[in-house]
Amino acid sequence: MTTATALPGLFSLGLARGGTELREFFRQRENVVFTFSLPAVIMLLLGTVYVKQPIQGQLFAASMVGAGIISTSFVGLGISIAADREDGTLKRLHGTPMPLASYFIGKTILVLVSSLAEVVLLLAVAWLRFDVELPTDPKKIATFAWVFLLGVIACSLLGTVVSSLAKSTRSAPAVLNLPYIILQFISGVFISPLTALPDSLQITGAIFPLKWVCQGFRSVFASDEYQVLEVAGSWELGKIALVLGAWCVAGLLLVTRTFRWTNDNR
């Protein structure tokens, strides 16, 4: 009499998939260099031109860290899923007992590791080049942690949704980078304070997560006296948590409705 072998659990499969995702990502050296270096190079170039005072460095570094983790979560993850769909990886996985949730656990591990690495790199550049003071207050560090987690989750889900619009791996970078570049300008990354923008662009930027992630990080890197530079005149931490949390829920619902295993129905 033979005994059926129990299949690994959802999280065990997800962890195993996460290890595979990390190995595949870091083997692609050109992709790794480009993914991590682009935000750092932009920080160096724009910071050298615009940062003239210490507080400008603090605010700019905070916004660039926000843009950096959105790059790895929204853009990087979206392109990765589009590639998995085109080369048949998703189709093959769909034919195995591995649940879709395990696949996303693996992608989440990849995004969290790459986003943390991006944060470390950007903070190192900000500290070495612009003398940015890193937060030491436990309360500010805790704020950084929850803004980071909610921002990464929300933008990863949105990247997954938008990846379904890409017809191929070639088109994926354009499909994902275009909204990302636009949002950087209307979310307070390149233009600060946001009050310098027309009201219509301020309202548009406030709809999406990037604005709130950057604002949350500015509350960590700048003292409270500078919150008057925000549109509402305060850091609005409660509202940041509410908006990012809402995007996490909305993103999850959109993923369940838009996710495609193959490009056959394009």
Image (cartoon, grey):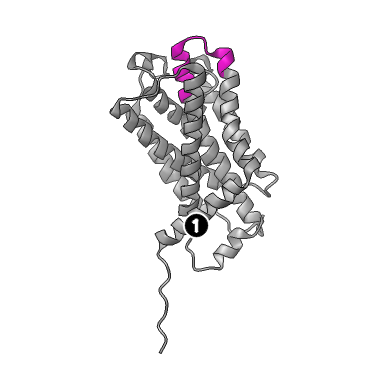
Q: Relative to 171, is 160 on the left or the right?
A: left
Question: Which of the pair 86/206 is nearer the observer?
Answer: 86
Report the label total.
Answer: 1
Q: Is residue 193 visible?
A: no
| Residue furthest out toward the front | 128
Question: Which of the pair 37/160 is nearer the observer?
Answer: 37
| Residue furthest out toward the bottom | 1
Amino acid type at circle 1 is Arg
| Residue furthest out toward the right | 170
Position in image of residue 176 (x %, y %)? 61, 39
- 34 versus 15 height, above or below: above
| Residue furthest out toward the top | 52
Q: Relative to 166, is 4 on the left or the right?
A: left
Most common SS among magenta residues: helix
Question: Which of the pair 11/127 is nearer the observer?
Answer: 127
Q: Quadrant of residue 36?
A: top right
- Reply yes or no: does residue 97 show up in magenta: no
Position in image of residue 9 (x %, y %)? 40, 64
Q: Quadrant of the N terminus?
A: bottom left
| Residues shaded magenta | 47-62
Position in image of residue 54 (x %, y %)? 45, 12
- 8 versus 222 height, above or below: below
Residue at position x 51%, y 14% in the image: 196
- 162 versus 234 height, above or below: below
Residue at position x 54%, y 18% in the image: 191
Q: Is residue 78 visible?
A: yes
Q: Secondary structure at mark 1?
A: helix
Residue at position x 37%, y 23% in the image: 219
Q: Quadrant of residue 49?
A: top right
User: Which residue is label 1 attached to?
Assistant: 17
Q: Quadrant of residue 262?
A: bottom right
Q: Counting other residues with Cα less than 10 Å from the Cα at mark 1, is it few (<14), some (14-19), or many (20 or more)?
A: many
